[in-house]
Amino acid sequence: MIAVLKKTATKDQIESLKGWFENKGLKVNESQGEFCTVLGLIGDTTQVDIEMLMGLDIIETVTRVSEPFKQANRKFHPEDTVVDCGGVKIGGGHFAVMAGPCSVESREQIIETAKRVQDAGATMLRGGAFKPRTSPYDFQGLKEKGIDLLLEAKAATGLPVVTEIMNPDHLPLFKDIDLIQVGARNMQNFELLKELGKTNKPVLLKRGLSATLKELLMSAEYIMSEGNPNVIFCERGIRTYETYTRNTFDLSAVPILHELSHLPVVADPSHATGKRSLIKPMAMAATAAGADGLEIEVHPDPSKALSDGAQSLTPEMFTDVMAQVTKVRGIL
Amino acid sequence: MIAVLKKTATKDQIESLKGWFENKGLKVNESQGEFCTVLGLIGDTTQVDIEMLMGLDIIETVTRVSEPFKQANRKFHPEDTVVDCGGVKIGGGHFAVMAGPCSVESREQIIETAKRVQDAGATMLRGGAFKPRTSPYDFQGLKEKGIDLLLEAKAATGLPVVTEIMNPDHLPLFKDIDLIQVGARNMQNFELLKELGKTNKPVLLKRGLSATLKELLMSAEYIMSEGNPNVIFCERGIRTYETYTRNTFDLSAVPILHELSHLPVVADPSHATGKRSLIKPMAMAATAAGADGLEIEVHPDPSKALSDGAQSLTPEMFTDVMAQVTKVRGIL
Amino acid sequence: MIAVLKKTATKDQIESLKGWFENKGLKVNESQGEFCTVLGLIGDTTQVDIEMLMGLDIIETVTRVSEPFKQANRKFHPEDTVVDCGGVKIGGGHFAVMAGPCSVESREQIIETAKRVQDAGATMLRGGAFKPRTSPYDFQGLKEKGIDLLLEAKAATGLPVVTEIMNPDHLPLFKDIDLIQVGARNMQNFELLKELGKTNKPVLLKRGLSATLKELLMSAEYIMSEGNPNVIFCERGIRTYETYTRNTFDLSAVPILHELSHLPVVADPSHATGKRSLIKPMAMAATAAGADGLEIEVHPDPSKALSDGAQSLTPEMFTDVMAQVTKVRGIL
Amino acid sequence: MIAVLKKTATKDQIESLKGWFENKGLKVNESQGEFCTVLGLIGDTTQVDIEMLMGLDIIETVTRVSEPFKQANRKFHPEDTVVDCGGVKIGGGHFAVMAGPCSVESREQIIETAKRVQDAGATMLRGGAFKPRTSPYDFQGLKEKGIDLLLEAKAATGLPVVTEIMNPDHLPLFKDIDLIQVGARNMQNFELLKELGKTNKPVLLKRGLSATLKELLMSAEYIMSEGNPNVIFCERGIRTYETYTRNTFDLSAVPILHELSHLPVVADPSHATGKRSLIKPMAMAATAAGADGLEIEVHPDPSKALSDGAQSLTPEMFTDVMAQVTKVRGIL
């Protein structure tokens, strides 16, 4: 960590600051310039609060040379982490496709979808039981019943299942779920992250609507620092001024997260774009960018079902997407 | 609600959609144009899921004419709501100033700050006990102990207190807190909102980092629809590309929320700007824009305390801000 | 175009508005609802100013059913446009790779780069002669001399050249340039667009830093409506809150622009990411998303040259990128 | 300027970089840390291209300690600049109100508006003659004729006039215009800025839709470095994800620009919000934040005129705004 102090900092202020750093076990390397004093901090600076430092009147700028995340950091863990989700491996060359409806609606719907996506090549089944909705008046999911139906579909097909948790008190309901999803709106629900950190369940951590990649990494750190190493990132689009797509799919996140972290990275073109016609090209693009998996919405009969989101594919369309994605995987 | 159907929609599809609306108790007014069919939906459309509709192939656009929020809506509640927080009224002409440190650090710090801000004209004491931090390695607040110290400061000064909740399980600890804050990162933690809705505690609902004003209104609706009418909005800056300030203070939110809702609106120039020198002009601006109150960080001795954020005022600076804000209030 | 009028609109106001539309040659289809009156406008509404309409007190919302762009619109021109740039075709299945240095620096540099990128498979040479810089004190390019050197490199290799224009008065200097680039900062320099529209030169129109795709399409319309049909779009990243990359590469733009328009779409991973290590995965992703070409920065000897941007590849790296991109092209 | 070099930088690379800095006339202060080498650069670093440096493999980070803008910098010019626009002073305690229609439409309209806004207390007349429009099919203004009508209104009332320029070739038409506006879309049209820098005309430089404040300052520097010191900033809202207002009014820009620069700062609540009902509170807020002036759209008879934007006030409304703004001015 490099702290640049203002020219106006007095000798006393500088000594007091140096003492404070040294009390934290850091070695301080001072160098005087004409316009500023530079302090180089050597040692474990992860516990130094950068915003607090920025608040001091004598500080010009502070730059972290080492990242504030450790357990998620590739520097300290160079090999790719492979997460096992009910027998399906993700990361380190293992590519997973999680497909299924936005919401679990009925036994027939979820079991039929599970079979159809399995036939098309999906390796996991997704489906929402607890649904975070902007409006309290919108459908909030089948809840416990939805979890039960997912598990029935798992029993019927053998596909491991992924579904979203919204409340740490619900954890017991998720004991047979293979991959627990933390939604974008809960990426910084630190209380939820800490509780998930106390389990050893694989967690699919979706990027927040306006989260930086550093914040996403720090949220993984919340889970990992409690003892759970099984974290998978999911890029699902960020909020920008552009309104044509529901979100802006930030695919650069895939190679960046791979550079910075050893954890697997999955991409969700359905939520990122919100438009059915964009899912195939963006699924291919995400795969070409190096994603370790995809999460895609598929509904068995969108023409009948009114609850079919603009972003759901039919099983036929999904089969086509899988064929193209498989070709892209083939050249990597 | 106005649904514009594509030219390609067949007679059968249109009839099926009309039937679906009618089953929801809506009256449907159809008009045929050369390029499209327009359905006007009359009745209570709050329960119609607009995203689901947008997903249908035959839909060109859907526009809500009536807003999806009801209890927070000024149309159905024209008079300003006044929220009573431990004897301090906010809204409907009542202006409140909540001041205090970012974090409760010690008995001396919080009691001294309470006295100093009270002398300067603050009407409530703020202070963080549970602190949401980006990093699990950063200071997370004094927690229960912090709540106790806040209540001691309340006893010593008579100032009602406001502090943040992060977990619904902590609610019993907040029984003597006068105003419970929901932080920006939890604005869409719907499980937390619903639990707060089951109490009758005043709630200070901070706008999320990238929340639209409609989403903020819908989050208030989550609390209110459970039975708690005591919601106060807080504009605290949104995330944009500009890095000079910590956030971008969207002061237009103040008059907009007043137009759309009867609930009080408070502004937080400390978090919005992250810079001490900007707090005075922006507190004045927020007041001039019609805010019903301010939340401002004040620390008794920032020159000594390393934990003083860049955005904390000294009590002397705060006294100066209060004098100017009072003048602005005088001309409204 | 659908105009929804407020319930409070009087009969006189509605008649006056209808008359105004009819004077513009539009047929007006009126339907009365309980909460609003809906006017459906039939005919050529491209000349109706939607912002002006939104300004009227009686208007609730206005929605365009037909897009305001015509010449760039795929609806009126279903086949892909193929643009010929000095013999290199772009669009309609023709894939072009424009490579070269950010700035033309010297004869040796540009000619060597041209040969190296040609060997690696590039089909066009890029290089900046007039450089738009945030600071007036930064290097502004070799200007006329840079154009001359580019043309020398073209003569030496046969590669057509692409370079940026900043001022319509410079057009005579560009008479032998094969593809004239309009930079992101000039995407809405309408005076420049109109002048380019009066030529028949191929134009590479880069998306503005915060331009919506609709605005990008309208800027193409500025060029095309003056008579020049040779427009190529370039997605080069948009400005968001994320600071890890220079911009956020919005790859969804590629399939969206292909849906909405018949014009070719090129992607620029160098400027979009600003980071050398991201260029290969993002070039592959852009190709997989269906881009008709790539623009990539390559510098012959970044280890020597201090002017080598963080985003420039060496010729060796570029050769590797080309090999992977070619494989992705092979499966499309 | 502080350059932090990576631990992996070799002795030769460091020496070569130091030599390069020294060739630019900079003194280099080197300090070795355990994890990095820090170079402090002393002297005039405005001409060092920070992006170029960032591109070097051996660089970890580069931080400017001194700002890259000089002529606009308050450090080198501590007193407020007062710009004289046809006899109306702006800055340094002088407050100006520029009011008038979005577009000049006719002699009657502009002269009547001029008289009405003058009566209400405006000190300058604004009106668009050359209009930058997103669509080539929208009304582009009366152009030369509009300039003539503005000058007639100036003659009739004595109010100095402000209007927008889009093309440096039009400069001769602006010889009697008192304040030349550069619109948001042209804030980085560097060719236009340089031409305006060669005149001594006051320039109203509007912030770009996604321009940082540093970029705005650098654009002023383009004008000033050519010799014209008469620059006035205008905050007019930035583009964010929020769609309720046309733009997000970033009022913090007012005190920040005052801190960083000696130039006057004007605010435009009409374009920033795009909504008539927000103009009064936001004009008051901008004034309370310390703005040196306001630019406000006023149209004489919005109920008749179809070209009245949603953001235009009637003269009566404007009179009310002026009364409130004057009260706010009174307490500063």
Image: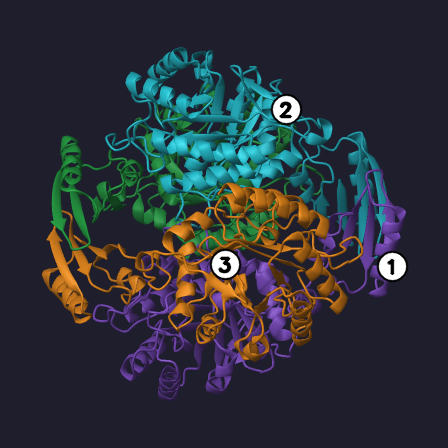
Chain colours: A green, B cyan, C purple, D orange
Q: Specify whether residue A160 is in view.
A: no
What distance separates the C-alpha of mark 2 from that of mark 3?
A: 41 Å
Q: Position of residue B293 (x, y in %)?
A: 52, 29
Lateral position of residue D4 relative to residue C253, left or right: left
Q: Amino acid at mark 1?
A: Gly
Disc 2 versus disc 1: nearer the observer: 2
Q: Amino acid at mark 2?
A: Thr
Residue at image mark 3? D90
Q: Specify whether residue D154 is in view.
A: yes
What distance separates the C-alpha of mark 3 from that of mark 1?
A: 45 Å
Q: Amino acid at mark 3?
A: Ile
Q: Position of residue D101 (x, y in %)?
A: 68, 60
**Location of the N terminus of chain D (image quadrant):** bottom left
Same-chain status of marks 2 and 1: no
Residue at image mark 1? C19
For disc 2, the chain is: B
Q: Is residue C294 above or below residue D250?
A: below
Residue at image mark 2? B81
What distance separates the C-alpha of mark 2 from that of mark 1?
A: 44 Å
Q: Check disc 2 and report its element: helix, strand or loop.
A: loop
* Neighbours of disc 3 within 10 Å: few (<14), some (14-19), many (20+): many
Q: Check disc 3 and report its element: helix, strand or loop.
A: strand
* Neighbours of disc 2 within 10 Å: few (<14), some (14-19), many (20+): many
Q: Is residue A78 above or below residue A145?
A: below
Lateral position of residue A87 relative to residue C194, left or right: left
